[in-house]
Amino acid sequence: MAQKKDQVDGGANSSYDAGDITVLEGLDPVRKRPGMYIGSTGPTGLHHLVWEIVDNAVDEAMAGHCDLIQVTLLADGGVRVIDNGRGIPTGIHPKYKDKSAAEVVYTVLHAGGKFGEGGGYKVSGGLHGVGSSVVNALSTRLVLEIDRDGDHHAMEFIDGGKPTGKLTVTGSAPRGRTGTTVAFWPDPAIFEEIEFRAQTVVERLQVMAFLNKGLEIRFDDEREDGKASQTFKYKDGIVDYARHLNASKEALFRKVCSFEQKEETMEVEVALQWNTGFYDSIHSFANGISTIDGGMHEEGFKKSLTNVVNKYARAKGTLKEKDDNLQGEDIREGLTAIISVRLQDPQFEGQTKGKLGNVPVRSMVERATNEKLAEWFEENPREANQILQKGMLAARARLAARSARDLTRRKSALDGAGLPGKLVDCSSKEPRESELFIVEGNSAGGSAKDARNPRTQAILPIRGKILNVERARIDKMLKNTEIQALISAIGAGLAEDFDVAKIRYHKVIILADADVDGSHIRTLLLTFFFRQMKPLVEGGFVYVAQPPLYSTLVGKEKIYLKDDSAKAAFLVDHPNHKAEFQRLKGLGEMDFAELRDTTMDPGQRSLLQVAVEQAAIADEVTSVLMGEDVELRRNFIQTNAKDVRFLDI
């Protein structure tokens, strides 16, 4: 006899009918699946809330109705964003008869002034119209204030977007002001942490000011020990941005090439300047939104740049008839470029707008670059020749690097496993449980060897500071002994040949001294991994161990302290402490027991004690390497432990 269907499907009491269909009302879908709307519930997603509200204010600026935005990190953990735009419409919405337009914007998904053919926005960067409502849904409280038509309106939402009442007029708009003020407090039940990082906010606001010529953006931090107030305003826009990005590098020439072109529904601005480095830095934006994965505007620019340079080189005789064209990577070596497009109805791939998909934008950017860049070359022959010469050198280096990589592959094949002689490997052959500790010097290597778990922990000593790959082409880099050892030990190749599936260890741990030299070594190693083994970094396989700087005794127990700040905090908690502090200057001075107890024993540490997303280290290293903030570059390892996957004590 055939079984009843409900028994087959899961038991006698199971059912599946109309009553089992759950309908998520209002903003419930956002709280149920926040990652679909903001990417994640980690630090990146938390800060995305700020971006959404700021983007709405910037949309007003792009529409020509706003020239001042104020962003404040509040003392109680909230964020307030004020703009002097037109103010969100306050009248009753024609579809939702009992709700104001402002309430609809903050409580209904896909509601906003960025759709249809009306006069709301010609271009905008809002998240497909869902930004405001998503922020509301993911906050414990949101306060909305609108100055419009001479009146000051106010409304409050709590518990994930529930209105406490209707939008009401509370008085007159001060001094005839217009604009919108939004204050919100993120929900700790949604996010892994709810503390905003001032540096992250400041960097984003500065970019917004660069992209919107003449827009003034003010930042304040009212929290205890908050970052100092800053104001950003740039009369030359993205030209100033290009200069800023190259400030920590050596520019190939002083001039910044810039051009723009406007068409009926689209416009583009481009600024570019070369430096003497070996890596390109292309920053693209669509309606003020950073398109970190590129898209059609980047494709059009890169294709046209390659064509224009090669055409110019042929016309001037720099490239002969028998010579091959320069490749795009040759021409872009050392290039810093900003590509900013504005368009109606941007088509982004993914909810968080990582890539622009509008095909007509590619053609527009190609046309603009073909025409305007060719003109700039003719008007600036000295700079154009410098670009050509750098590209020619890059092409020769590319061919030399190919030969060097081929030689490295052949050598590895002849050597069998190709493991460096100084590697003290672990016995496990299972990458998922294997750890590679990169330590400075033989003495530290000896201590680490004694302290390790030989089954799962491998030790690779390196001698001093490795080659700075930011200042060396790949052909020179591949001749460096320490670089060769790293490549061989990790076992997955290099650059475009790197295959993350072949890595021999799922934890590559930088274990350097807790001093300035150790900090420099960590930065050099991170730079190498980011430039030549990027999937290793992006996959979350790179860690930074944090050995202590001090130890002391409390009774008979030895206490380890990470740095001077930890020592100061310890003295506050133990004002009568009499025992001396031992400064552990280097790993080589620590005996194997100290090293094991602080940085190498899984029982003594939490691998993810600092809870950050796997991509956080990639974001931070990118900021350092791009030179977007000189102070950040200088203090990267020492002061940003919260933003790196640290193995902390």
Image: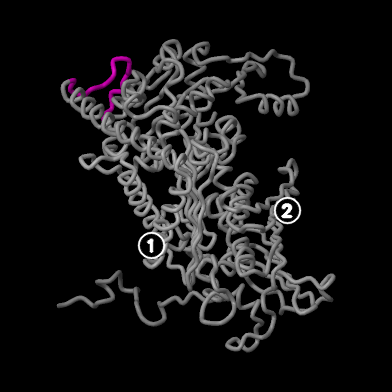
Question: Residue 509, relative to residue 7: is it above or below?
Answer: above
Question: Residue 10, relative to residue 401: is it above or below?
Answer: below
Q: Name which of mark 1 and mark 2 comes first in the sequence.
A: 2
As helix, strand or loop, the secondary structure at mark 1 comes to: helix
Hey, which quadrant is residue 488 in on the image? top left
How far across and down, in percent of the image, does residue 173 sit?
81, 73
Q: Nearer the viewer, residue 110 or 236?
A: 236
Instruction: Report which residue position mark 2 lands on.
Output: 74
Tell me which segment is drawn in magenta: 415-429
Instruction: Report which residue position mark 1 lands on.
Output: 362
Question: Residue 506, relative to residue 256: is it above or below?
Answer: above
Look at label 1 and name its amino acid: Arg
Look at label 2 and name its amino acid: Leu
How far across and down, in percent of the image, does residue 526 sit?
45, 31
* Residue 431 visible from this viewpoint: no
As helix, strand or loop, the secondary structure at mark 2 comes to: loop
Q: Nearer the viewer, residue 246 or 493?
A: 246
- The residue at 45%/14% (across/down) is 444
Q: CA distance from mark 1 to mark 2?
A: 42 Å
* Lateral position of residue 259 relative to residue 179, left or right: left
Q: Nearer the viewer, residue 263 or 135?
A: 263
Main SS type for the magenta part?
loop
* Lateral position of residue 565 relative to residue 638, left or right: right
Question: Residue 608, relative to residue 169: is it above or below?
Answer: above
Q: Would you call the spot at circle 1 few (<14 residues within 10 Å), some (14-19), or many (20 or more)?
A: many
